[in-house]
Image (spheres, rainbow, N blue to C red):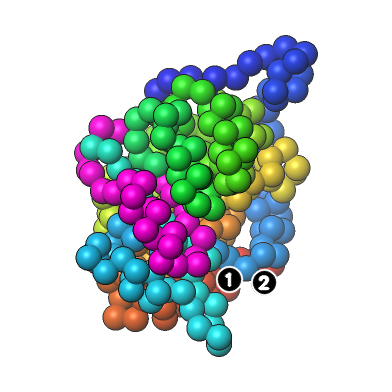
Amino acid sequence: MRAPSVRRGPDSPIGPHRPLRLGAVSAVSESAVSSTAARRPMIAPSILSADFARLAEEAASVAGTEDSPGADWLHVDVMDNHFVPNLTLGLPVVMALRAATDIPLDCHLMIEDPERWAVGYAEAGAHNVTVHAEAAVDLLGIARDLRAAGARAGLSLKPDTPLEPYLDVLRHYDTLLVMSVEPGFGGQSFLPATLAKVRQARHLVETGHLRLLIEIDGGINAETIEEAAEAGVDCFVAGSAVYSAPDAGLAVTTLRDKAAAARPAH
Ligand SMILES: O=C(CO)[C@@H](O)[C@H](O)COP(=O)(O)O
């Protein structure tokens, strides 16, 4: 794992050297986690589980109706067969999707050299562009460039990557994507141990140390979404639970309702 690029000192983009520490977060209080749940849970269907020959229709199937809100974001998994052992799609498909749907695109770059590619996804119209901490060298530069190109900047951590080394960098990001499976494939089983990271991040958001949206990705379905919601997730990526369901739109509604019910403040 490469260290994040963080400059220190009086002119540091992250301010004076007063790094965040997780010590104060070791005992996450229930109230800190549960007081968050004011916003509607967001659902981001992952098109990795969709029919790639019918992407526009698959996007439309989760767009919602006048009576029921559809997907908040459409999650687009970009894999390069280097950072992960799978190959999916790239910029041309994202551009085509952008033209085919109004659902904000949430591009998750599971690629090496994100410094080279990330901003292109923002320029292609992605609403949120997430890079992997394990793949990047210049995390501050990526966040700056994504925001300058008009996108939200997202940082993702694999299941075994700790949060603490990235706390200062995360002050410059809009989204934290906690991977709850090893990145690379849909349809894997949810790893509950990854929720510890969600609770840590939620506590830091609730106490004003971080200001970002907490997203989770991998193995989210009707059985696992409640515990993720209880831990403090804002946005739930779901691939097979949506696109393997008989009615993808209904699956989105069901997942959102379950997440909303599991949030203690609701
Ligand atoms: O990024 C990934 C996998 O690497 C995910 O976005 C998957 O697409 C989620 O699929 P399910 O686990 O929900 O089936």
Residue 191 seen in the figure: no
Task: Please state which of residues 130 and 36 is positioned toward the viewer in this rendering.
Answer: 130
Task: Please state which of residues 91 and 71 is positioned toward the viewer in this rendering.
Answer: 91
Q: Quadrant of the C terminus?
A: bottom right
Q: Secondary structure at mark 2?
A: loop
In the depicted structure, whether residue 125 falls above or below residue 156: below
In the depicted structure, whether residue 221 falls above or below residue 7: below
Q: Amino acid at mark 1?
A: Ala
Dot 1: within a 10 Å radius of its alpha carbon, few (fewer than 14), some, or many (20 or more) residues? Answer: many
Q: Quadrant of residue 37?
A: bottom right
Residue, disc 1? 260
**Residue 230's spot in the image, x, y percent?**
56, 60
In the depicted structure, whether residue 143 falls above or below residue 53: above
Q: Is residue 243 magenta?
A: no
Q: Is mark 2 within 8 Å of ligand 1?
A: no
Q: Quadrant of the N terminus?
A: top left
Q: Marks 1 and 2: in contact by CB < 8 Å?
A: yes
Tally of marks = 2
Q: Amino acid at mark 2?
A: His
Seen in the image, is 229 located left or right of residue 2? Answer: right
Residue 105 seen in the figure: yes
At a point 46% along the width and 74% down the height, the residue shown is 63
At a point 77% along the width and 13% down the height, the residue shown is 10
Q: CA distance from mark 2 to mark 1?
A: 7 Å
Q: Earlier in the sequence, mark 2 or mark 1?
A: 1
At a point 57% along the width and 33% down the height, the residue shown is 145
Q: Quadrant of residue 111?
A: top left
Q: Secondary structure at mark 1?
A: helix
User: Which stretch did the figure color magenta?
Assistant: 82-108
Dot 2: within a 10 Å radius of its alpha carbon, few (fewer than 14), some, or many (20 or more) residues? Answer: few
Residue, disc 2? 266
